[in-house]
């Protein structure tokens, strides 16, 4: 992996973007209107300048396409593994849905005369039970009612209602799936099924174009999402509400929720209460579920949720891969301070955070203090106790781990642990009978907390790559990708990360030192040493807030002599929210050997380069650089890679600045090697390109001109200020990307290339003049600097080709 490819892997970018320019063609990809059994959606993607693909969706509603729906995580990384599906954050989509209103009355509680029977109303239809017994069963999209016969001896059916026909409008969770596949991006959609997700629904034409314009939206064909499960809601008298959630009944009474099993609910009437039964978890026997007291009997509220809340919290942190992100005490204090001031910007004192020697972890309201045991020095534990502090500071009446507390905890997860599916976590809490409010005040005033979190765990000591990507709004691979942890640490301005890629099983290691020079408290440059998935050792210098760098880099190790060499260059990436460009060493191993020797006497590396009449300088201390916990992984880098066949071509890509690049087209047989120098035609803003290539064992040399008319075969050229030479070259045209070029080049390039290589030793230039065919008065001239053209890593391929 090149240094530029590694930009996205370590990218931490602000996730809040202004969505603009959503303009998609009118509907019409499908031949006929679908039946209203769900909702018709189409997916869309657009390319950003940093190579990421942003995804979104639209729904067909009321005869037109809705506005774009944008998940919070919606970016397919530029370095996404080919063929691997990634998923967006869930969003709510409007859909047709079967909706039924049910009301169960118990007239005896109202003082009415007559037997103590249940009276039911279902969408205007009325029913009455026998013997004070009523059973509700939901199965196969049907609601069946049963009661007793006249003798109260056996069950008998009372009614059956089909709930599969959409009768209203509901909402359901959906998410977008995306993957890079054979050079194109494929999109799909999933909808919520219980506590999980459906199979991917893939449109007939699901792939975005191979060539995409930056900023333009491209969309797929449509696909129909099935309707969400039937929604049954109503009341069991005025004392309790009744809902159908994921096929099971839920009752809420006296601020408590009870969730049935297996789609079964049985009611038995008593004098002052209704006894409610349901099936056990194995669907084998009825068990007591709840007691609904009459209007003159009330239960007291208490913190009955604590143990259940702990169990639910642990389960969802584990499921989301969000547990165990370790924090230092200073980091925990900084994070608590940032979150607390988000909610209470005018309060003078946030909670004090202390570390205790015992196992106790809690928020002490009397002292306004958060106590954390050693085991609790984690991000999730800090968020848990901070939620208690916020509840107390807001004066919210809540019994410990009650409905309001859980609502606030979910809000904190959503903002600071976005890898947790909070919608699903809320649904699971409700399904387990926990009380969760829809929201809790005070509302969030500021959003400094997420920024502080990114700075703490994503900039220096990278503790969770997956969480950092999620904070940046990128698509999520799920908790099983192996990226939630890894060996990471920091020591002053030196930090490191080493992890094993879950797909390849290869260890990837990065060591970073910040420059001594700083501006506004941040370093001007970074030195990185890395071993990536290609088992290749790399050394790079990163320059903050630069768009590009010149390839000539001057460096001095310790008090040694200054040296100058051409380094690879890269640009256009973001890291820690800043723009970066950089240099990459051509021979990393030799450079590190020199650094390692000097590090023994605590020297420093001094680098500089000149660009646009300005000299950029940076210094990096070498002390401790080769004694970190990841040193062994860097030493072993490449050790198991088989020796390269001396006759095999070198496979490499890179560039020296913006106007010289090289590569090897491995898909060609045999692989084609090329080196390209880019300049402008004299007196114009049009491009001219010089290309050296080895194709099919023959050395080629051509000059490409971005002009409109064909060129004559007669060409004049001058090498390093020598005498002009006139020759007959071949000529033609070709496309380079989206631009048509006219080209000229000698039939036998070996002699000319040998002359150019000799002149390049002294930094000479090649000036070429071509004329328009049929119009000798129209001439085009271009000047190509030869320095660097014959100094690329693929030069041995060209040398062998010339032989």
Image: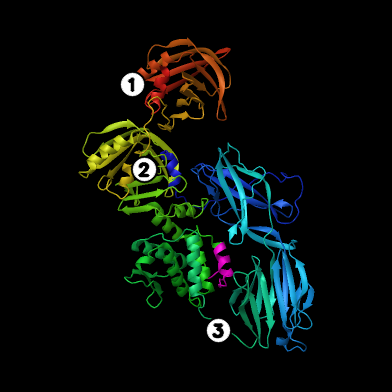
Question: From what the image shows, is residue 193 above or below residue 514?
Answer: below
Residue 96 is at least partly visible in this image: yes
| Highlighted range, magenta | 424-440
Q: Of 615 and 138, which appears nearest the observer?
A: 138
Which label sits on residue 761? 1
User: Mark 1 or mark 3, which is nearer to you?
Assistant: 3
Question: From what the image shows, is residue 295 above or below residue 719?
Answer: below
Q: Which residue is mark 2?
A: 530
Contact check, label 2 and label 3, Cβ < 8 Å: no
Callout 1: 10 Å neighbours few (<14), some, many (20+)? few
User: In the image, is residue 329 part of the stretch drawn in magenta?
Assistant: no
Q: At numbered mark 3, what does the secondary structure look like: helix, strand or loop?
A: loop
2 or 3: tag closer to the N-terminus: 3
Q: CA distance from mark 2 to mark 3?
A: 61 Å
Q: Of 437 and 448, which appears nearest the observer?
A: 437
Position of the N terminus by quadrant: top left
Q: Which residue is mark 3?
A: 300
Q: For residue 327, what is the image quadrant?
A: bottom left
Q: Position of residue 335 (x, y in %)?
A: 40, 62
């Amino acid at each position: 992996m090149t240094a530029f490819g590694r930009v996205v892997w370590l990218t931490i970018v602000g996730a809040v973007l202004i969505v603009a320019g959503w303009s998609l063609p009118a509907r019409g990809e499908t031949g006929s209107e679908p039946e209203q059994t769900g909702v018709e959606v189409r997916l869309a993607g657009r390319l950003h300048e940093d190579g990421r693909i942003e995804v979104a969706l639209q729904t067909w509603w009321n005869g037109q396409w809705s506005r774009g729906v944008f998940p919070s995580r919606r970016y397919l990384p530029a370095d996404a593994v080919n063929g691997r599906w990634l998923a967006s954050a869930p969003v709510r989509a409007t859909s047709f849905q079967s909706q039924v209103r049910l009301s169960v009355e118990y007239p005896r509680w109202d003082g009415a005369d007559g037997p103590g029977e249940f009276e039911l109303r279902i969408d205007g239809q009325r029913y009455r039970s026998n013997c004070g017994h009523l059973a509700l069963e939901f199965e196969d999209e049907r609601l069946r009612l049963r009661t007793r016969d006249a003798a109260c001896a056996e069950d008998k059916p009372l009614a059956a209602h089909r709930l599969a026909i959409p009768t209203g409008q509901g909402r359901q969770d959906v998410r977008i799936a995306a993957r890079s596949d054979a050079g194109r991006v494929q999109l799909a959609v999933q909808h919520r099924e219980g506590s999980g997700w459906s199979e991917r629904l893939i449109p007939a034409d699901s792939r975005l174009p191979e060539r995409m314009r930056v900023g333009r939206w491209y969309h797929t064909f449509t696909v129909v999402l099935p309707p969400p499960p039937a929604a049954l809601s109503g009341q069991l008298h005025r004392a309790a509400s009744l809902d159908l959630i994921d096929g099971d009944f839920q009752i809420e009474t006296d601020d408590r929720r009870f969730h049935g099993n297996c789609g079964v609910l049985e009611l038995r009437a008593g004098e002052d209460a209704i006894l409610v039964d349901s099936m056990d978890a194995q669907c084998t026997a009825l068990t007591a579920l709840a007691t609904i007291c009459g209007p003159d009997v009330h239960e007291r509220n208490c913190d009955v949720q604590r143990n259940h809340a702990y169990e639910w919290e642990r389960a969802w942190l584990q499921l989301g891969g969000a547990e165990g992100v370790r924090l230092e005490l200073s980091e925990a204090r900084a994070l608590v301070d940032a979150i607390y001031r988000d909610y209470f910007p005018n309060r003078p004192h946030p909670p004090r955070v202390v570390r205790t020697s015992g196992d106790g972890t809690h928020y002490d309201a009397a002292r306004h203090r958060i106590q954390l045991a050693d085991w609790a020095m984690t991000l999730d534990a800090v968020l848990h106790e901070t939620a208690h502090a916020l509840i107390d500071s807001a004066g919210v009446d809540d019994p410990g781990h009650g409905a309001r507390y859980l609502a606030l905890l979910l809000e904190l997860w959503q903002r600071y642990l976005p890898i947790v599916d909070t919608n699903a976590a809320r649904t699971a809490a409700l399904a387990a009978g926990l009380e969760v409010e829809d929201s809790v005040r005070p509302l969030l005033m500021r959003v400094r907390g997420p920024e502080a979190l990114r700075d703490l765990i994503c900039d220096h000591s990278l503790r969770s790559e997956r969480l950092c990507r999620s904070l940046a709004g990128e698509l999520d691979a799920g908790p099983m990708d192996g990226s939630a942890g890894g060996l990471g640490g920091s020591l002053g301005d030196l930090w490191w990360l080493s992890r094993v890629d879950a797909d390849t099983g290869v260890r990837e290691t990065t060591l970073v030192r910040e420059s001594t020079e700083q501006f506004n408290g941040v370093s001007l440059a970074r030195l990185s040493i890395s071993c990536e998935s290609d088992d290749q050792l790399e050394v790079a210098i990163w320059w903050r807030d630069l768009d590009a760098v010149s390839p000539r880099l001057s460096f001095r190790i310790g008090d040694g002599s200054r040296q100058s060499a051409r380094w690879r260059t890269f640009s256009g990436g973001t890291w820690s929210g800043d723009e970066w460009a950089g240099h990459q060493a051509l021979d990393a191993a030799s450079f590190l050997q020199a650094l390692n020797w000097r590090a023994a006497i605590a020297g420093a590396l001094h680098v500089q380069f000149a660009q646009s009449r300005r000299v950029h300088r940076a210094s990096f201390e070498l002390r401790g650089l080769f004694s970190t916990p990841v040193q062994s992984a860097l030493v072993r880098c490449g050790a198991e890679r088989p020796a390269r066949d001396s006759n095999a071509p070198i496979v490499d890509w890179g560039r020296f600045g913006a106007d010289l690049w090289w590569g090897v087209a491995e898909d060609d047989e045999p692989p084609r090697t090329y080196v390209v120098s880019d300049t402008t035609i004299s007196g114009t803003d049009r491009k001219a390109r010089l290309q050296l290539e080895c194709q099919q064992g023959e050395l080629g040399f051509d000059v490409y001109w971005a002009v409109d008319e064909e060129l004559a075969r007669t060409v004049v050229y001058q090498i390093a200020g020598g005498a002009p030479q006139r020759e007959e070259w071949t000529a033609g045209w070709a496309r380079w990307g989206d631009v048509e070029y006219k080209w000229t080049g000698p039939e036998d390039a070996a002699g000319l290339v040998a002359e150019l290589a000799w002149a390049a030793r002294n930094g000479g230039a090649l000036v070429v003049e071509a004329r328009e065919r049929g119009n000798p008065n129209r001439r085009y001239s271009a000047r190509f600097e030869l320095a660097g053209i014959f100094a690329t890593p693929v030069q041995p391929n060209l040398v062998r080709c010339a032989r």
